[in-house]
Amino acid sequence: MSEIVDSFPEEPLEELRRGALYRWTLSRRTESASQELPDRITGRLIETKEGFVYQNALQRGKQELHENRSPAETAEFVKSSFGESYRQLNLHGPTADYELKAKPNGRIKLKRMKPSIKDYVASHDRSKNYLLPDDRPIPFLIEAGLMTKEGKLKSSGRAKFRQINRYLEFLKDILPELPVDRPLRIIDFGCGKSYLTFALHHWLTEIEQRDADIVGLDREASVIDHCRSVVKKLSLEHLSFEQGEIAGYQPEGPVDLVISLHACDTATDDALIQAVAWDAKVILAVPCCQHELFSQLHNETLQPLLSHGILKERFAAMATDTLRALALEAVGYDTQLVEFIDMEHTPKNILLRAVKGQGSEGRSHAEFESFRASLGAPQLRIEKLL
């Protein structure tokens, strides 16, 4: 599909900023461009230790030079170079290819075409010790559409694969805290589509060779039906999914690990309260969209900060997580707040990691009350722990 536009189209530019395009090429140097510029510049998406970047290649004489730029920097470079120094730009992505040609009148001829590159791998000839192997078939990844039947990661699934492995690294850290003399009992609250629940089951049972009974719980019937169909299709044992609410759920036996990723607002508190009531050895929680404290928050000293809605919202979220950590410490859990990258490329979230230990009941309870008072003495669900 071709069309004439008045300015650089936002759609391919935004895809470039996000690192969602595989390759790009600037060609057909303009008459006004510096003669020192190469005839063409190409870029390809690669994966480095710091994340995804575009490796740009330009020819100078017989020598090909390479430089890496972030997706955002690449987008600005391409946008400023096209039309000014080069008359043609070709971009290749997973859903479409784009061809842009700068016209003499300043307008742009844009052509959208079907994607020409399939199963692109943004590798950089480096090895990576993943907890899940990336060179052999893994049934749940194949079923999720992230991997081919031959065990090759699809380009569209590589980011999720890295995030899944990052999640498993947190679980590997706490594995020594869990019992070894019986099957583990794990509850995953708000499991959703369950990429991570299936990953945990595969890693524990197939790689770590641990016996584990894992239950995924979610309120959405359609989600549970989907997960059950995958379990049946892959003939997975000791992994089940149930529909229900966090508050009031009763397990069939002792619980060793409770997981709650992105349970909205006070649902996170319900998960923490349930986990403590069951005397769970380890709790992993990533809170989401916290609103309970926001409307009750009051502090004269902090009023300049609280007068800005977005800052107040972020502060309320951090304060809520602080109170959760203090409450867990007060009931005997050693608690840490660490950075966790979620599955949707959103900014870094907080992972609350609590391990049953000595805690610091007296000090943490006093700190909880003191900190709560400084926020205007709000009434919060997490107080049920105390």
Image (cartoon, rainbow, N blue to C red):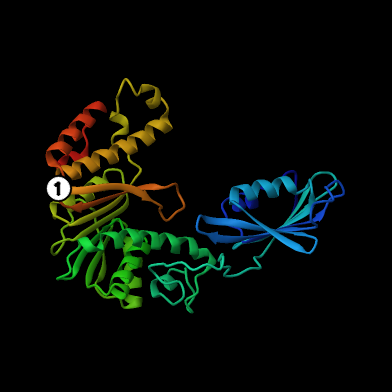
Residue displayed at 66% across by 65% down? 114
| Side (left or right) of 325 relative to 8 | left
Residue displayed at 42% across by 27% down? 308
| Side (left or right) of 325 relative to 165 | left
**On the image, numbered disc 1 is attached to which residue?**
332
- 170 or 310: which is nearer to us? 170
- 367 or 125: which is nearer to us? 125
Position in image of residue 148 (x %, y %) = 49, 75
Position in image of residue 274 (x %, y %) = 18, 51
Position of 86 relative to 139 (above/below)? above
- Give the farthest residue toward the right: 31
Residue displayed at 46% across by 75% down? 135
Residue 171 location, quadrant: bottom left
| Side (left or right) of 159 relative to 102 | left
- 366 or 233: which is nearer to us? 366
> Is any atom of residue 8 visible in this view?
no
Position in image of residue 279 (x %, y %) = 13, 55
Position of 184 relative to 206 (above/below)? above
Position in image of residue 230 (x %, y %) = 35, 72
- 158 or 11: which is nearer to us? 158
Q: Amino acid at mark 1?
A: Gly
Residue 47 location, quadrant: bottom right
Label 1 element class: loop
Q: How many marks?
A: 1
